[in-house]
Amino acid sequence: MKTRKCSDREKAQLKRDALKFIIPHFASNQELAKGAKIFTRGKGCYVWDIDGRKYFDSFATLLTTVCGHNRPEVTRAVKEQMERLEFFPNYVDTFTEPLINLARKLADILPGNLAVSFFVNSGSEANETAMKMARQYHLERGQRTRYKFIARRDSYHATTLGAGSVTGLKWFREYFEPLLPGCLFVSAARERDRPPNMDSTTYGRQLLREIEALIQQEGPESIAAMIMDPIPGSNTGYPMPPQGYLEGVRALCDKHGMLLIFDEVQTGFGKTGKWFACEHWDVTPDIMTLGKGLTGGFIPLGVTVTTPKVAEVFRHKPGCEFRSGSTYGGHTVACAATLANIAIIEKEQLVANARVRGAYIRNKLEALKQRHAMVGEISGIGLLLAVKLMADRQAQIPFDPKLGVGGWIRDWCYRHGMILRNNGDILVLAPSLIISKTEADFMLALIEKAIRQASTRFHV
């Protein structure tokens, strides 16, 4: 691939203009003060910046490029579709072939009875739509009082005001309150939080009793749905749930007539070693939301998928139609790109690769933990993994956040040719599903070198 070379003067101007004319998503003024990072091309698991430096991307371009960058199969599908019909909206009574074919394909690969799709533009929009769908579902069935949602502390679901209201992380909420009324929170269900001398099943039951108590306090007839991520995302390091918890949540929703919404925007499309994270527990929701890896990063697309049972209430007569939509939801070219992306996952057996390669990386991280005192819990599954850094692992004492240990390790890796995601002192690894053993070894070796340097710097 040929790219135009910029002069030093042009590069400097681009970097100035980036800061002058653009507010980045989730901007960090501390990081922006160091200057803009501008990327110009990608191939496989690698990207190059405007200065020609090459980086291994251990976070798959914010969990999107599951099949790697610059896949000619997807580029070809996009080009062919744009030469036929670049766009026609999925509006009122109009459809396109790629849209129909993608909906059919999703019905084929999704678990349980999930089969009816509502296409949007992003994961945030998918979660917003799921909440609207749950509310209107109950209204159409004569249960207008069901408007509340149960969510979990420390889970992330959206940047929109509605679905942001069920995000249980303070940083995403505090500047925008008051948010949507009727959003209730229960404890995060993390195996790592299990009290000493309590087994996993008992802890799961304790968390389920907390949900049951909240339902009874609020009144089951007031609750529309519970929304949750089967495995919470990178913000908390992909913590696993206690045994029996997901099955118990499903049973509670059935018992009280609530819908269950699974947010699989981060965890879907093979990253856990199965197509969808909920398949590890054989639990299927009433509504599932998808984004990120859905399209392989080529073009924005999200989807809210539900069951025929839920969808039917919006179809049985005029006036009951689902009242939501946007101009570009289910964009024609985005659907073509997504079909090509899914075809690559199937052809190259990338879900299996995520399972095998993820287990290999996990074992190596556990060994690394034995060699370095600052390495605490290793969490996650498949190619969604995290390393928690600790000042004193034995006493479970975290680092003082002001030290910025995780950020220091991230910056060290960047200077040495790797993009590493950190959330405070949690290092997150979520590479593309195409990662090879050689690339995994490179990633692991660089992280270990960074940890060794950090151990010296921070006297651990």
Image (cartoon, rainbow, N blue to C red):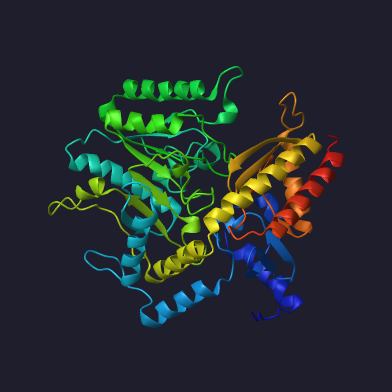
Q: Percent from the top left, x then y, of residue 165?
A: 42, 40
- What residue is at 27 percent from the left and 68 percent from the top? 95
- What residue is at 44 percent from the left and 51 percent from the top? 124
On the rendered structure, is 368 left or right of 258?
right
Query: Of 106 and 120, which appears nearest the observer?
Result: 106
Do we see residue 424 in this rendering? no
Q: Percent from the top left, x then y, of residue 166?
A: 43, 38
Image vertical order of residue 207 relative to residue 172, above or below: above
Do we see residue 151 in this rendering? yes
Look at the image and tell me in which quarter the C terminus lies. Answer: top right
On the rendered structure, is 53 left or right of 139?
right
Query: Of 271 and 56, which appears nearest the observer?
Result: 271
Query: Of 356 and 10, which appears nearest the observer?
Result: 356
Q: Residue 67 is drawn in which quadrant?
A: bottom right
Q: Residue 325 is drawn in which quadrant?
A: bottom left
Image vertical order of residue 191 relative to residue 355, above or below: above
Look at the image and tell me in which quarter the N terminus lies. Answer: bottom right
Q: Residue 318 is drawn in which quadrant?
A: bottom left
Q: Percent from the top left, x then y, of residue 129?
A: 34, 50
